Image (cartoon, rainbow, N blue to C red):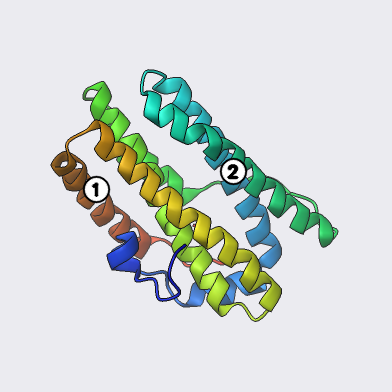
Amino acid sequence: MISESIDVKNILGLQLPTDPRWVNLAEMNLVEILTDHAYCEQKAATTCITLIQRYPDKTKMVEELAPIVTEEWGHFRMVLSELKKRDLLLGKQRKDEYVNKLLAFQRKGGGLEERFLDDMLKMALIEARSCERFKRLSENLEDSYMRNFYRKFMESEAGLYTLFINLSEFYLPKEVVRKRWKEWLAFEKNMIAGLEVRGDRIH
């Protein structure tokens, strides 16, 4: 379980915390946040399926990600249930500028192992940032029910961030993973600094 005093940089590795204004904007757009959150969970499940299909020979990865598909789909259903309780529809999927920029940073050439590493680190970064955002919501929303709702997601995302890092280091030398991870973190820091602060998106 992640600590109450989670340090964004030392534990999650993120180089830039979320702008404090984001939580206030999110609270004013909670319906939009729930819809975007639902799609984030759905995409996480389908991405894990894609990774299993892409690297079927990596047995440990397949075994570790198989239950994550179920977990993420369960999270999707949890958010759907929250929308239903509020008599709200899911709504349409939105463009995810954050993830699209991460995809653009991935290496397009190179060998299979390089592509595998970037796939793992991209997922680790998404989970780390999601954890950090859920932490903000769990601590700063005025609604105590919703604070608790997002604390559950925060704890789960922290574990998933670690899983993807560990899988990278299982298949590749630790120094190779750490070097590339620093590059990802530096890119994400600059990218986050340049993105508009908006309260209708998880990322």
Q: Which residue is mark 2?
A: 71
Q: Nearer the viewer, residue 28 or 118?
A: 118
Badge 2 element = helix
Which residue appears at 41% of the width and 61% of the height? 195
- Whether residue 51 is visible here, answered yes or no, is no
Mark 1 sits on what residue? 181
Give amino acid for label 2. Glu
Residue 58 locus on image (x, y percent): 36, 23
Q: CA distance from mark 2 to mark 1?
A: 25 Å
What's under tag 1, amino acid-wise? Answer: Trp
User: Which residue is most to the left?
Assistant: 175
Expressed as whole percent of the image width and height from the top left, the position of residue 17 reads: 37, 69
Tell me the number on the disc at residue 2: none
Above or below, comparing residue 49 to residue 8 in the picture: above
Q: Pick the residue in front: 82 or 98.
A: 82
In terms of sequence position, does the residue under pointer 2 or pointer 1 come before the other?
2
- Looking at the image, residue 107 sits to the left or right of residue 80; the answer is left
Residue beneath the point at 39% across and 22% down: 55
Residue at 24% across, 48% down: 181
Q: Nearer the viewer, mark 2 or mark 1?
A: 2
Classed neighbour count for the residue bearing mark 2: other residues with Cα under 10 Å, few (<14), some (14–19), many (≥20): some
Q: Is residue 136 left or right of residue 125?
A: right
* Picture coordinates of residue 33, whole percent (x, y): 63, 61
Q: Position of residue 131 (x, y in %)?
A: 47, 60
- What element does badge 1 sit on? helix
- Camera-nearest residue between 196 and 43: 43
